[in-house]
Amino acid sequence: MIDPKNNSYWLETAPNFKGAVGFEFLGEKFDVAIVGGGFTGLSTAMELAKRGAKVAVLEADRVVSGASGRNGGQCNNGLAHDFASLAASIGREKALYFYRSYVEAVNTVERLIQEHDIDCDFRRCGRLKLAAKPEHFKKLEKSFDILRDGVDENVELISSQKIQDEIGSTLFHGGLLQSTSAQMHVGKFGVGLAEAATRKGVKVFENAQVIGYNRFSNEGFELDISGHNLTAKQILVATGGHGQSPFGWFRRRIVPVGSFAVVTKPLEKDLLDKLFPTRRNYVTSKNIGNYFLVTPDDRLLFAGRAKFSTSNAKSDAEAADTLSAMLGQTFPDLSGIELDHCWGGQVDMTQDRLPRAGEKDGIFYAMGYSGHGVQMAIHMGPIMADVMEGKVDANPWRDLGWPAIPGYFGKPWFLPFVGAYYRFQDYLH
């Protein structure tokens, strides 16, 4: 078996971004400097430029090379949480507000694609949550009843007798379908968004690591980009808050958790029709489960938290072996199938798995999407443009507190224990 390439399928099959500018443009004065060239940074830059602002995007690598280009390609409506559990903890009204924010986020993605004519294989395919155990289906039944009661009319319960019409695996005991969720080629989308932003006048700098900054009382900020300086009236931090960064306040509030993916060689359409007749987004109901979809060129992307660790070359290779075994167990027809790609990425988790956005000591931020960032990261662009103009009420996450995680200082030493706990919970329930 040929070893798969250790890189993101999305990034390798996307066109090259040709709009980056040289460091000589750093000498210009900008209204806004955005740290991070992923979905949030590019979406915000686009919106601010449309409103007349002079914007610089500072990306330490290449555009969308982080989480934006290393995810599962799913653009789903709804929360990362069970709605009933979230409503019990924060109240039904606020939980409903958050849920509908995610629904609107998918609409924002579609609107941007249409507005800027971005070729990225966007498709409203629906998301199917698959019950991995009979008792999990009972929970999905309860969720269905709650969602249909004034939360989301676009949900459907798929019984154990009908689940084979949706997926060619004997492991599942029914499912909950949210029909308006979407999928897209996130690499093509990210490059298309970056190109559209440059057409609006945004200056995008690649390989531009921000290593420090100074604040001037009346004139904004000066940022140090590897020995080069840039001045801006406002800063937006649109990264995960971890790793090398002078914005250390975020580091104690964001936990980077590895999420891993493999992509198969192209598969025969007859086989895909047998296994995935409806070509949806799929996610399983276990705590340590999987999520998967069929790519636009007829491959299977199969992903999950195969290891509770951060992503690195060793973890990525070990996770690829684990995911290959999971893939074969889920779909025996694909047991031992050749893999073309494997990679890892960082999911930026907050303690309650809800995003955070706002302003801290004069610095704006939006991050912490906790594994559901494809749609929300993009949606936060227009919202943060409003917030930076003083329209604080536009931010759905404005009232959430954000204390530091006790005992955490940037190195997630506790991840193996978290993984063990979730594995035990999957065994019990």
Image (cartoon, rainbow, N blue to C red):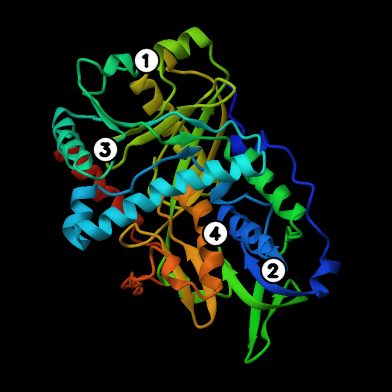
Residue beneath disc 2: 53
Tell me the crowding category of disc 2: few under 14, some 14 to 19, or many 20 or more residues within 10 angstroms, Cα based.
some
Residue beneath disc 1: 332
Q: Position of residue 234 (x, y in %)?
A: 62, 76
Tag 3's secondary structure? loop
Q: Which mark is residue 382?
A: 4
Can the viewer see residue 112? Answer: yes
User: What residue is rendered at 75% in x and 54% in y?
Assistant: 198
In this rendering, position of residue 19 left or right of residue 2: right
Report the Cα–Cα distance between label 2 and label 3. 45 Å
Disc 3 versus disc 4: nearer the observer: 4
Give the residue type that dot 2 points to.
Ala
Residue beneath disc 3: 286
Give the residue type that dot 1 points to.
Pro
Disc 3 versus disc 1: nearer the observer: 3
User: What residue is rendered at 73% in x and 68% in y?
Assistant: 54
Which comes before the other along the chain, label 2 or label 4?
2
Tell me the crowding category of disc 4: few under 14, some 14 to 19, or many 20 or more residues within 10 angstroms, Cα based.
some
User: What residue is rendered at 70% in x and 66% in y?
Assistant: 52
Give the residue type that dot 3 points to.
Lys
Q: Position of residue 44 (x, y in %)?
A: 59, 60
In this rendering, position of residue 240 left or right of residue 77: right
In the rendered view, would you say 296 is above or below 285?
A: above
Which comes before the other along the chain, label 1 or label 4?
1
Which comes before the other along the chain, label 2 or label 1?
2
Q: Given contact means CB atoms under 8 Å apart, are the residues at marks 3 and 1 in contact?
A: no
Q: Position of residue 228 (x, y in %)?
A: 78, 74
